[in-house]
Image (cartoon, coloured by chain):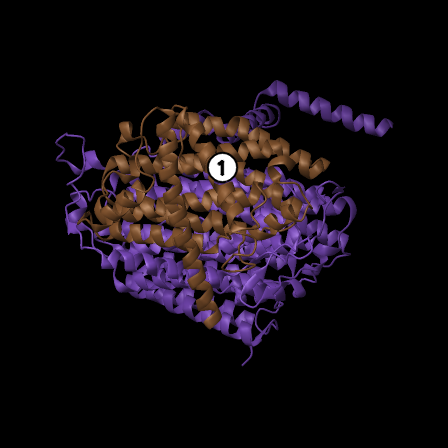
Amino acid sequence: MIEILMNIGFGLGVATFGFVLQTAMGGINRKIAARLQKRRGPKWYQEFIDIFKLLSKRATSHGWIFDFGVIMALGGIIGTAMFMPITSSIVAFEGYDNFFIFVYLIAVGMLGMAMSASGSGNPLASIGVMRALTTMLAYEVPFMVVVMTIIKLTGTSSLTGIAVAQQTGDFNWFMIALPLGFIVAVMSLMGMLGKKPFETYIAPAEIASGPMVEYGGKQLGMLFIMHEITIFIEVSLFVHLFLGGAETIIMFLIKYFIVYAVLNLVSNVLGRFKIDQVVTFFFKWPLFFAVVQAMIAIHLGWVI
Amino acid sequence: MELSIEIFILATLAFGLMAYVIGRLHKQLGSIMTILGSLTIFGGIAYLGFTGGLTGETAYLTFTQFEISEFGLFFAIIVSFVFAMVSFFNPFFIKQYKYPALYSMLFMFSLAGAIGVFFSSNLLYLFFFFEFVVWTSLFLIPMGRSKKAASWYYGFSAAGSFMLLFAILMIYNANNGSFHISGIGSVTGTTQIIVFIFMSGAAFTKLGAFPLHIWLPKVLTNAPDPVSAVFSGGLEKLGAFVALLAIVNMGGIGFIIPSIDMYFGQMIIATLGALTIVFGTLMAIRQDDAKKLLAYSSMSNGGYILVGFSMLTSQGVAGGLYHIVAHAIASTAAFLAIAAVARVAGTTKMKELGGIIHKMPVTYMVYLIAIISMAGIPPMGGFISKWMIFQAVIDKGMIFIAIATVFGSIGSFLYVFRPLAALFLGQELPQFKKTVKEAPFFMLLPMIILSLLSVYTGVLPGVIIDFINKIFVDMQLNYNIVMNGFAIEGYTSGIEGVGPSLLNPLLIACVFGVGVFVAFLIFIVLKKSKKIDLMDTYTAGNFVYTEEHLHYSVDFYAPLERLYEKYIHIMKNFYKSLANKVREFGAFMKYFFFTNKPEITVFWIVALMVFLLWGDVL
């Protein structure tokens, strides 16, 4: 009993760590992007200020489902983050960090947010949710094919298991071992994070921030926290799957920073797709490459 | 206590007759008999089944033979449970039907038929009960919106029944005149392949799998609302039962494909199952009628069952069986929730509905839990079955099947969200502000029980996994699912130092609970929000006073639908042109054989004479 409580406390620590890390990373990357555009940019802790300001303000609510959805969204994401390993040894629930938990438990959070947004009664929010779900259908399929290839090769769906398999030298880092799959995964990760060119569902100038349109005050603050933790989950998932995980926390921070910064730089020079372009894009080349990679790796056994 | 299964069948029939007689006198009382009857049958079978008190002896129906098998029991408990839950809705819907007494009787009779199918050890009587279900359920359908749906059902069911009968006769022939059910496993060679094809065909028609799915959406849309729930949760599972006999019990069919270690026959089934998933998902996304949407979702979930079975591994078959439980519970709950809305709102078209949640919050929660399970999201039952099927598919390294399963799984988020957003959420339309109110207690009761079971199967899978293991022993299959405490062991690892991948549903549920608790704490300690009206929203400076204009529900996924709308009629056109060809062939035959033109008659007389004389010469 005590042990389980300790683990849960540990898990909450991981979630908090993720929130702090990603919020700081987000601030730093805003600064980097600003310097590229010859601006000064905000302070690196600007995002913390924004979130705490929002949390302290009095907000409006559109009924119980509006609030309930927000709680379910943040709860689901915190729950998912609690399973996330940081290094191969720092993991709250050892042996239970099954890959599918991250894909499906994160969906509870997404569902909560979608529900809350639709419950606000604003059509722009519903359009945003529609676009978010459509984008999800697009990026998730190629990504899952690549991850299934990795699971088939390593023989485990435990995230630490996959990371350890890369560290002990059974496989190279999967970004090298499965080069085509890696390219696909990078594109899918951009879709997951809602970075340009796949930020169709936020599209501030077009549908007024999509799902977020009706929020303010503490609800918006909670959704910001949820958003930061979601990004933490997705980027760390990528680090563990393709970059060999991390032996130490420093390595984790470095890898995390590189992945996030590179994606941020790429997205800053791109425009935005229309929603049907997102779908046709993902179902054309990324899916094709993912299938080719899976064929090569599983049936021919060619893994670098 | 020991009771024979025939007592249950006779009791069900007796309840049906009583429901008819009482129903002639008083409509509601007759339908209340269906509640009592199906609850008694479910309680009896479940209690005696678990305590080992069921026997197959026959004293009255001496011409039939019954045997109590674990898998028969498994299906019988699920189906009778679905009937028992749905029967609570009958008294509230009985006034809509033209023949209320007949409805109550047929409702009970189809349950009797289903129990007969699951326990018959003689294949010929299995066929008899199979037909009994078709004939009783056939007359339930036209009491709903359309009579034409019944003819679609009859057409496809007839094809399925003939295939089943043909397969049974082949088995009879191969086993030297024995109709015993164990004969299915002992056919060999070409006969085995033919039997496999025909039995799978029968399973596909009942399950509504691609390419024999056309009847399913029509029936589930047009049947009376409780009957749709019975079909989706209960009677469709007859197809899964036949599929289990054909795909798993018969073993591998044809040659082994070496690179994926799959038998050719099973590979074909898996491919068709995958097509069922993709097709069902794409069609469900573009429906406007909530019942039709759920119908296509049933079809897509049937595909998961087929994919799971055809893997022929512990994870795959167990995943398929678990999916039967999870889907029966979730789908019944979803259909009942929609039925509850239809009863007060008078329609299931999503473009005409909106904001029902403000008057029917409990129904909304039931629907929410059902769709979480259907989409395979923890902590509900659907997650565990989908996880096991995923593990099995990856284990085999089948990429294209994996694409279909993932596509179906993510696609299900899209389509199950559609009724949530358009029907329950969004603006509260003025026409429903006064007329709509929460369903009465006896309608909420079965829905709440189903929701609790959805959660239970998703948090504590132990009981059902044990049952599935017993089925494996009973069917003499070399499969086993290992439970490690509360966790299920998946795929065993090939790497040293890494244990098998574990899934602990209880832990996931607890952690999710902790997450929600933390979020709730954050929410509650912060300043209280001001409640504002739904119409008080951001409209980019426009003044909008009508609720409809702020309710986004028509063509929800229009950009996505546009990408494939050209291709949706492929199967329908195929069947249409097939029907045309049959009609032409019939006209051709009629012209030559059934005509009153003298020259044709003379021609046949001459031809016959020539034939007879020729035969005489030779």
Give how far across and how far down residue B314 sits, in percent. 64, 56
Q: Quadrant of residue A297?
A: top right
Residue type, mark 1 in image: Ile
From the viewer's perspective, tell me whether residue B545 is left or right of residue A94. left
Does the rendering let one see residue B536? yes
Q: Which chain is purple?
A: B
Q: Quadrant of the C terminus of chain B?
A: top right
Q: Left or right of A139: which side holds B496?
A: right
Q: Is residue A166 left or right of residue A4?
A: right
Q: Determine whether the residue tagged by mark 1 lies in a helix, strand or loop.
A: helix
Q: Residue furthest right?
A: B618
User: Closest to the observer: B204 or A82?
Assistant: A82
**Could you tell me which chain the residue with mark 1 belongs to?**
A
Picture coordinates of residue A148, whole percent (x, y): 59, 43
Q: Position of residue B216 (x, y in %)?
A: 46, 43
Considering depth in this image, is A147 or A295 the residue closer to the camera? A147
- Outermost residue on the bottom side: it is B1
Q: Is residue A19 above or below residue A292?
A: below
- Percent of width and height locating residue B130: 55, 54
Q: Nearer the viewer, residue B352 or B133?
A: B352
Please name whichever residue, A268 or B210, is drawn nearer the observer in this view of the structure. Answer: A268
* Number of numbered callouts drawn: 1
Q: Where does the N terminus of chain B fall, quadrant-wise?
A: bottom right
Q: In the rendered view, would you say B280 is above or below B482? A: above
Specify few, some or many for label 1: CA neighbours under 10 Å numbering under 14, 14-19, or 20 or more.
few
Establish if B234 lies above or below B47.
Answer: above
The answer to whether residue B303 shows anywhere in this view is no
Residue B447 image-quadrant placement:
bottom left
Q: Residue at x 45, y 28 (%)?
A: A266
Q: Which residue is mark 1?
A: A258
Q: Residue at x 67, y 55 (%)?
A: B249
Q: Colour of chain A?
A: brown
